[in-house]
Image: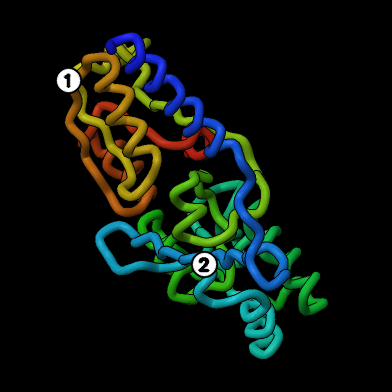
Amino acid sequence: MRKLFSVFAVLIVISMVAAACQPAPAPSGGEGPTKVETVVVTVEVPAEGGEAQPAEAQGYGTIVARVKERGKVVCGGRTDLLGFGYLDENGKNIGFDIDLCRAVAAAVLGDPEAIEVVPLTAADRGPALQTGEVDMLSRNATWTSKRDAEWGNFTWIMFYDGQGFMVRKDSGITSMADMDGATVCVTSGTTTEKNLAAAFADAGLTYEAVIFEDTASVYGAYDEGRCDVATSDKSQLASV
């Protein structure tokens, strides 16, 4: 009886496998294959501490149309970073980043002087783009996937840079390990601030952050001796 049961069980399994391998029956009435509809659901990614802000909220072409109607390009930039965005002796904003803004104005409006530069702190960069306060961001901003999703479309990399630390010659600091327990001046809302925390944590070091909204205040506090170290982009440190 046990042997017969075993054979019977095998036959059942074989029958099930064979049935599973058969093609699905064609629909009755001679109709073609069943049409399967795909529904795409768009989910907005919420910005930090706020409501969802889709990067394409303003729509394709609307910014260019707005620029043409206004007659000038409004760029989020800087007025205090030598070489990139700063005021010359005549009060004119010049530099690498400002030249990019002028190039866009020349391409869209035929006039490189048809620009307005709105000075932005690091923390204001994303919100200014999301709300339409500026047409484009033409200032230093590290490209991250999170910012790409929340701020809008980054175009191409304009400048390769890295983070550095500035210390006094007589500080005795020659390596990161020497900065254990140091006070560090840093700008808020930047990848510099996040990298600082990650690097010290990975190295098992401690530090006290002295945080400012703008980079000029970072260097001012450093000059006043309020911190042992200042950290920022190497290009910025070189301009101090």
Q: Tell which of 33 and 57 is nearer to you.
A: 33
For the point 49% across and 44% down, the residue is 144
Asked if residue 91 shows in the view, the reply is: no
- Tell me: 44 left or right of 71: left
Q: Which residue is mark 2?
A: 39
Q: Which residue is mark 1?
A: 181
Note whether 178 is above or below 55 in the view shown: above
The location of residue 7, given as percent across then percent down, is: 41, 16
**Regarding mark 2 in the picture, which secondary structure is present there?**
loop
**Regarding mark 1 in the picture, which secondary structure is present there?**
loop
For the point 21% across and 35% down, the residue is 209
Note whether 162 is above or below 39 in the view shown: above
The location of residue 52, given as percent across then percent down, is: 35, 67
Q: Residues within 10 Å of mark 1 (few under 14, many from 20)?
A: few
Separation (CA) of disc 2 from disc 1: 55 Å
Which amino acid, mark 2? Answer: Val
Note whether 87 is above or below 9 in the view shown: below
Which amino acid, mark 1? Answer: Gly
